[in-house]
Image (tube, grey):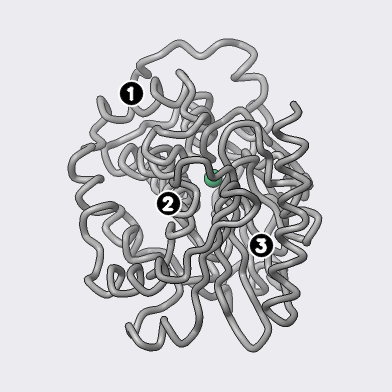
Amino acid sequence: MSHPLFLSKMDSDIFAPVVDEIERGKRFLVVSHVNPEGDAVGSLLGLALALRGIGKDVVAFLEDEVPDVCRFLPGSGTIVHSLDGVEPVDCTFAVDCGQIERLGEDFVRFNGRGRLVNLDHHKTNDEFGDINIVLPGASAAGEIVYDLLKAARIPINADVATNLYVAIHTDTGSFRYASATPEAFRKAGELVSLGADPWDVSRNVYESYPAKRFEALSMVLSTLETVSEGRIAVLKVTLDMLKKVGGGKDIVDGFVNYARAIKGVEVGVLFRECGPDEYKVSLRSKGNIDVSGVAKSFGGGGHPHASGFNISGEFGEVKQKVLDALRKAIKEGLRS
Ligand SMILES: [Mn+2]
């Protein structure tokens, strides 16, 4: 199978040790982070299906369920959520994950991981692998998987292409974010020529929401408040709201973007209650404001414009702490 674009020597060199692992190994494990989204699922399945395509034995593992909008992805039915009884593998690929703990308890406990290859684009990645390919310039882990497959001369069929296209499409916010580089567009274009269907993807990812998502949205939007002269917009999701609409936590995925979408707002923040005095905080920023440092200071991580963390405490105090940190980040960002 020929590959559409010439890969520069430098790119292939980066992947040479990983290509070695693929050539040497028979059994592989591919894993990604808890609370998986499009890039986690797409890059995981893209790699798993491609390796299966060249006759490798591949276990695809996610600790958490595949989100509804990713269930249409080819191969998603083959993902396992437990490693109990799984035979040791020669090599494990972790994709789209900055910290080993984020791969889930089951993986951290698993004794048979073999050589661990870390393929990621989070600048907060702590290089936990035996081999680490961390490229913060990549829009999505899916881009890195794509380059790896080309470096290894592994065929990319329509199913693999669809997964990698979704990875890039979702992580660039449908090619709206600064991460939507010429490279991201170029790779997405190649993936379309290899069989990814943009309308089919859009219909499944963005136009197949359950009605209860919109019931939840109307409740969550009613909590909207702006602070710091309109520079920060805050939304809150309570367990009560989720209970009322009868939805899981992924029913509110992406709602934080509505907070950021307001004119004049530099940072959108969403507090999601996940237990008594327990909150998952999502941060989204615009322009020069980098919220990944704020997330890291609270023990989380992510990207400059999209990051998050968990925090415990009484809501008023938690909110105050987070807003103080964000005001600082905004001040620094507006100065730079
Ligand atoms: Mn990603």
- Residue 190 marker: 1
Disc nearest the viewer among 1 and 2: 2
Callout 2: helix, strand or loop? helix
Rendered position, 143 above or below 223:
above
Mark 3 is on which residue type?
A: Arg
The residue lying toward the viewer, choosing from 168 and 42, is: 168
Quadrant (top left, top right, bottom left, bottom right) of the C terminus: top right
140 w.r.t. 107: above or below = above
Task: Give the mark nearer the N terminus: 3 vs 1.
Answer: 3
First in residue order: circle 3 vs circle 2: 2
Q: In this view, does 24 lie to the left or right of 299?
A: left
Amino acid carrying label 1: it is Glu
Residue 215 is situated, as x and y percent measured from the top left of the image, at 29, 74
Residue 225 percent across, percent down from the top left: 52, 63
Three-letter amino acid code at the position of disc 2: Gly
Mark 1 falls on what kind of element?
helix
- Give the mark nearest the N terminus, 1 or 2: 2
Q: Residue 38 carries which label?
A: 2
Which residue is pictured at 52% across the width and 31% down the height?
A: 179
Image marks 3 and 1: residues in contact by CB distance under 8 Å? no
Ligand 1 near label 2 (Cβ, under 8 Å)? no
Q: Residue tagged by mark 3?
A: 102
Ligand 1 found in image quarter: top right
Q: How many labels does the image show?
A: 3
